[in-house]
Amino acid sequence: MQKTLSALIELQEIDNRLDELREERGDLPEIVEGLRSKFNTKNETKIRLQEEIDASSKRVRELTVLIQETKDKLNDENNRLYQVKTNKEYDAITIEIEVLQANLKNYENELVSLNESVDEKMSVQTQLESELSTIKTELEENEQDLKERLSETEVEEKELLKSREKIVKDFNEDILSSYEIVREAREGQGVAVVSDGHCGGCYSYIPPQKVVEIRQQKKIFTCEFCGRILVWEDK
Ligand SMILES: [Zn+2]
């Protein structure tokens, strides 16, 4: 039983260190993941916006040509007005001029609002680019940190897991499972060392007779209050 108890202490130490390593890594993996998805979302917006800007710019070029063409036609029609021979001809040209003027007005209005929206989108684009570059820097820093931290702890973690496996392999299953259950419920601590007549986990009082028995290490005792397996350590 003494062997089991000291194996339990060893197991708890290994688990503590494993918890510590995971703690050190902390929320870095989540931070990296979050930054990556933030970057991708903004980047998609930027790509979509660029497509819209390109389409608008194409339409601006078309409109510029259309406006020039319409102005030329208007000019021609106005010249023709001076050469008309009949009223009918005059009316026909006047109608044609009205149509051309209406078209010109529409083209010009469309051009103005397109230019405005392109300007607006381009300023959003500039803002997005600066945000993306900030996120990228932050992402790269965190990725580097995570990489370093993983490489620092990887070897130790592997060793610890190997030692843990070795201990757990020939462990009494009931004791192991009660250790695991309490560990789960008590912030990672399934074992508590008795100190000055108190449970080292929850600081509850343990009667002297029980302390003596725990010290003899012939049986497994658990704390009545927190359920942790009570062990004795010679100082
Ligand atoms: Zn306790």
Image: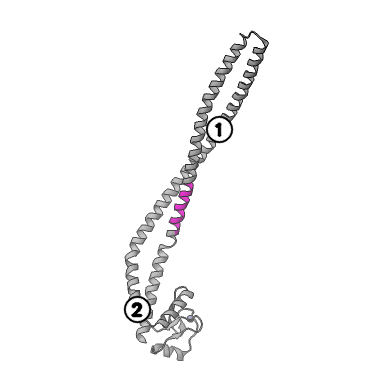
- Decide: is 84 above or below 30: above
**Percent position of residue 47, x then y:** 47, 42
Which of the image's four quarters has the C terminus? bottom left
- Residue drawn at x 41%, y 69% is 19
- Mark 2 neighbour class, 10 Å CA radius: few under 14, some 14 to 19, many 20 or more: few
Tell me, yes or no, if residue 18 can be seen here: yes
Q: Is residue 32 magenta?
A: yes
Residue named by callout 2: 169
- Mark 1 neighbour class, 10 Å CA radius: few under 14, some 14 to 19, many 20 or more: some
Q: What residue type is labelled 2?
A: Lys
In the displayed structure, does residue 16 sit left or right of residue 61? left
- For label 2, the SS is helix
Q: What residue type is labelled 1?
A: Leu
Mark number displayed over residue 114: 1
Q: Is residue 28 magenta?
A: no
In the displayed structure, does residue 156 sit left or right of residue 123? left
Distance in Å between CA atoms under marks 1 and 2: 73 Å
Tell me, yes or no, if residue 234 can be seen here: no
- For label 1, the SS is helix
**Percent position of residue 185, x then y:** 49, 75
Residue stretch in magenta? 30-42
Q: Residue furthest bottom?
A: 209
- Residue drawn at x 66%, y 15% is 91
- Residue drawn at x 46%, y 77% is 181
Question: Which numbered disc flags the more N-terminal residue, 1 or 2?
Answer: 1
Q: Residue furthest right?
A: 87
- Decide: is 81 above or below 224: above
From the viewer's side, name the closer residue of 208 and 126.
Answer: 126
- Residue drawn at x 42%, y 86% is 220
**Percent position of residue 59, x then y:** 52, 31
